Amino acid sequence: MAKTPSKAHPWHGISPGEHAPDIITAFIEIVPTDTVKYEIDKETGYLKIDRPQQYSNIIPALYGFIPRTFCGDEIAKLASERAGREIPEGDGDPLDICVLTEREITHGDILLQAIPIGGFRLIDKGEADDKIIAVLKGDAMYGQFRELADLPEGIVKRLRHYFLTYKTLPDEPAVMELAAIYGREEACEVIQASMNDYDAMPR
């Protein structure tokens, strides 16, 4: 009997794309209709349930990460330089990405091609936790955008509100800080830094 090929690990076994960081492959974990938060299990590569969605926040776009990226020393250094203060480390995860599309995509655990247009420099309890904002390649509505500043203001506000509040519990102080909103050029710098951090990871 022929041996069935094993599934590639979404973080380690898939390329970010030959044209990265200008066009990247993204692995999607969560879609807006999900009522639980899924995330990749770093050991096995399978999606796991991180937690039920406790409150009314709904992820406003496809959400996942860029394969073979890591938020480590270079991400922290870049965040420190741009924020003008010491940010000692990245969050130790693959680089997060939100992908905008007009299409209803009903489940995660998929790969897609995306074009980065900007990002949010978030600080999560002192750690750099960038969120790259991208558009689905070829999307009829969002595919025309190449800069975050060109998006309708309401979409940017929705994304910003989500990321500033999705970890905040009722009657507790906010844990996320938005240090900056940046455009396509800096988004590509962040992606490249995270790819460098991945290459520097101990194996």
Image (tube, helix red, strand yellow):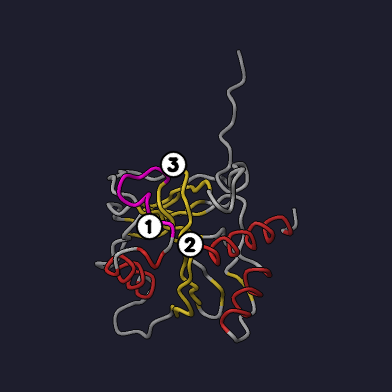
Q: Amino acid at mark 3?
A: Ile
Q: Which of disc 3 and disc 1 is earlier in sequence?
A: 1
Q: Is residue 125 above or below residue 203?
A: below
- Mark 3 surroundings within 10 Å by alpha-carbon count, few (fewer than 14), some (14 through 19), many (20 or more): few
- Mark 2 surroundings within 10 Å by alpha-carbon count, few (fewer than 14), some (14 through 19), many (20 or more): many
Q: Nearer the viewer, residue 61 or 147?
A: 147
Residue, x 47% and y 66% (percent of image)?
119
What main secondary structure does the magenta stretch of the protein show?
A: loop
Image mark for residue 37 = 1
Residue identified by numbered label 2: 132
Q: Disc 2 and disc 1: Cα gap in Å? A: 19 Å
Q: Is residue 84 above or below residue 60?
A: below
Q: Which of disc 2 and disc 3 is earlier in sequence?
A: 3
- Mark 1 surroundings within 10 Å by alpha-carbon count, few (fewer than 14), some (14 through 19), many (20 or more): some
Specify the quadrant of the image occupied by residue 190.
bottom right
Q: Amino acid at mark 2?
A: Ile
Q: Is residue 80 magenta?
A: no
Q: Is residue 77 above or below residue 20?
A: below
Q: Nearer the viewer, residue 78 or 41?
A: 78
Q: Amino acid at mark 1?
A: Lys
Residue, x 47% and y 44% (percent of image)?
113
Residue identified by numbered label 3: 110
